[in-house]
Image (cartoon, rainbow, N blue to C red):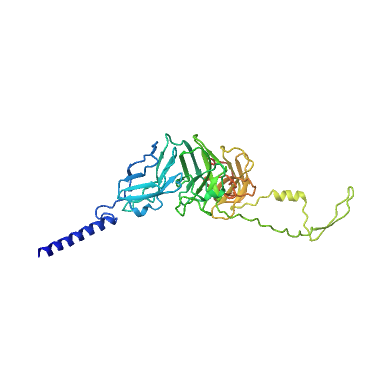
Amino acid sequence: MLMKKNIVMMVMAAALLSAFLISCANQSAPGGGPVDTTPPEIILSTHENGQTNVNPRVSIDIRFSKWINIASLANVVSIYPVLPKSFAIRASKNRISIIPVEPLEDNTTYHLVLSTSLKDLRGNAITEPISIVFSTGPELDRGQLSGSIRSLEPLTVPPKVALYWAGDGWNDLWYYYPPRYIVRGDSAGVFSFSHLREGPYRIVAFNDKYRRNRLFPGDVSFTSLQQTINVTSAAQTVRLFPTDSDTAEVKPVVYEPEEEAPDTVAAVVEKAPDAIFEMTFAEPQVMIDQAVRDSLDAIVIPNDTTCYRLNGGADCLEPNERRKWTFSPIGRDETFTVRDSAGTFTFRMIPSSKGTLKWFIDDNDDDKVTIGKLIPWRAPEEFFLVPGILDARGRWEIDGWQVNACE
């Protein structure tokens, strides 16, 4: 009887132990209490931001203020420059360990980035990417670069900006490999790099729709006016403009010229000094005396739907013979383009409407903004979207409208 009782007690103890182990193995948010909306924060890290002389063989251990949702760790951690054989991640409770497969390089500055996909057990994500910069050498790299993205359309998501080392032997296909550095721009497209290795780089911004921290062919993308940017310790600013990231080359379409129509003048009679010209036309013609034509040209028919003249400019602009201005009436498909004159624009006889204004450097003289191309590389055309709305009023002649056309 005593033996049976002991056996029953042992079975019950084993069951309780199994239940405890199972509850520990399954992550779940604690129930009850007020709703928790606080994101996790780093409270301790073996590698601190700005730290130097880091042991290249030591794993990176980070402790957070809250338990981490292990399922959220996929594609959360990035290390730049990219490690040749990547790294492993171990997680438990409020801790994660990042273990490089091979030791880090000596005398190298590394950027550890935790993306906003990192969440706690309540589903609260960190609001901004966490960046930890450290070096396995005695000092951090000092290169820096900042800039902004100019888009013809509103940015729907904050883009990512990638830098690719462009030393000897550059291949354009490297645009589609993991970059050396990457940062996320803000909602306005402004970005900043720090602690970069000094030297030549290619730069591309893109919408990371696959969340892989790399460019894919066909992604919405932007690049600089210069093919290569030399990064130094001195502060510098770069602007990025729309570019084509597709690898397929566009084949030119060749049109055969149509046969020219016959001249409307059928014959010209022999001309003699002080003689009257005589011409025979294929169709009846209406001949108007030049004095009458001049008087007709001077007549302006009042029209409430037409703005007679819209003139303005920006004192901050330097002269550029290739600059053009475009006025785009809101709600209409048509646009109106004029050449710049010493930083000013003059539109004549345009529809009376509210619209937007931009200037651009028309390198190929096709009266529109031409985007760049990565493969083969072609520089985009520079442009600037003037903030605000211009009102081209009907039957008005508007002169001297000063606009904010520079950053």
Q: How far across and how far down the image is residue 3, in percent? A: 12, 63
Position of residue 2 in the picture relative to residue 115 (left or right): left
**Residue at x-position 57% and y-position 54%:** 247
Q: Is residue 346 visible?
A: yes
Q: How far across and how far down the image is residue 275, in percent? A: 88, 50
Look at the picture and state if 31 lies above or below 235: below
Look at the picture and state if 97 lies above or below 11: above
Q: How far across and how far down the image is residue 240, in percent? A: 53, 45
**Residue at x-position 65% and y-position 52%:** 301
Instruction: Name the residue furthest front.
Output: 3
Screen quadrant of the N terminus: bottom left
Q: Nearer the viewer, residue 399 or 126?
A: 126
Q: How far across and how far down the image is residue 395, in percent? A: 59, 49
Q: Nearer the viewer, residue 180 or 280?
A: 180
Q: Nearer the viewer, residue 292 or 238?
A: 238
Position of residue 146 in the picture relative to residue 327 (left or right): left
Position of residue 42 in the picture relative to residue 254 (left or right): left
Q: Is residue 399 visible?
A: no
